Image (spheres, grey):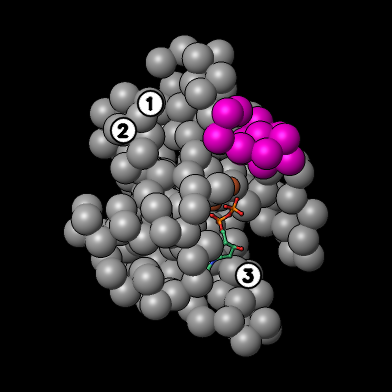
Amino acid sequence: MEREKALQLVKKQLTEHRYQHTLGVMETAISLAGRFGADVKKAEIAAIFHDYAKFRPKNEMKEIIINQGFPEDLLTFNSELWHAPVGAYLVEKEAGITDHEILDAIRYHTSGRPNMTLLEKVIYLADYIEPGRHFPGVEEVREMARENLDLALIKAVQNTIFFLMKKNQTVYPETFFTYNDLITKLED
Ligand code: DGI
Ligand code: FE
Ligand code: FE
């Protein structure tokens, strides 16, 4: 799909602020893909669609998670996690994206997962470091991302876990599994 067509589809789903975030993720994902050898076109499309389901009503997301057989433990954790797998589903259904690498990059962009593909890593990290992000620690991850994708990703996942714990929020197990997997491979 052409960039302009994809952007046009996504713009209708998002607020202006979230659309600007999406443009930032797109530019960052293209740059990371180029730097680390991921498919630049797939990175562009996955980035454009990654938050497609962000503003769907909770009831609709819940129904999709149940009906599509997505992990039901998601429903017992923060509903902020739901838009990722639901997005993968809706992007296929409504935008006609069938490439499974792209759909998985959308599906795992919030929690990550063990054995993430290069494209999944690029989208996770681009979402975290795009120029519109301003939280503490983001500049350090931006700098790490110039050199080493995995080290930057570990830092981003760590920061996310710290951030959630500081706010007394639950951490979805998959987020811990992502962290453990990356650390284990680092030691190899
Ligand atoms: O959609 P974005 O805001 O661009 O970013 P995102 O999809 O990475 O994360 C959305 C929210 O999900 C973010 O505010 C933090 C939350 N989140 C991420 N990982 C976890 C989580 N919430 C819980 N409870 N557990 C997690 O592991
Ligand atoms: Fe998201
Ligand atoms: Fe995002």
Of labels 3 and 2, earlier in sequence is 2
- Which-is-in-front pick, marks 3 and 2? 2
Query: Looking at the rendering, which quadrant does residue 179 occupy?
Result: bottom left
Q: Which mark is residue 159?
A: 3
Nearer-the-camera pick, 143 or 170: 170
Q: Is residue 100 left or right of residue 52?
A: left
- Asked if residue 158 shows in the view, the reply is yes
- Asked if residue 28 shows in the view, the reply is no
Q: Residue at x 31, y 74 (%)?
A: 73
Q: Residue at x 55, y 48 (%)?
A: 55
- Which-is-in-front pick, marks 1 and 3? 1
> Are the two marked residues, 1 and 2, in contact with CB atoms closer than 8 angstroms?
yes
Q: Is residue 35 left or right of residue 188?
A: right
Residue that mark 2 sits on: 92
Residue that mark 1 sits on: 95
The part of the chain drawn in magenta is: 11-25
- Badge 3 residue CB within 8 Å of ligand 1: no
Instruction: State how far apart marks 1 and 2 are (Cα).
Output: 6 Å
Judge whether 87 appears above or below 26 on screen: below
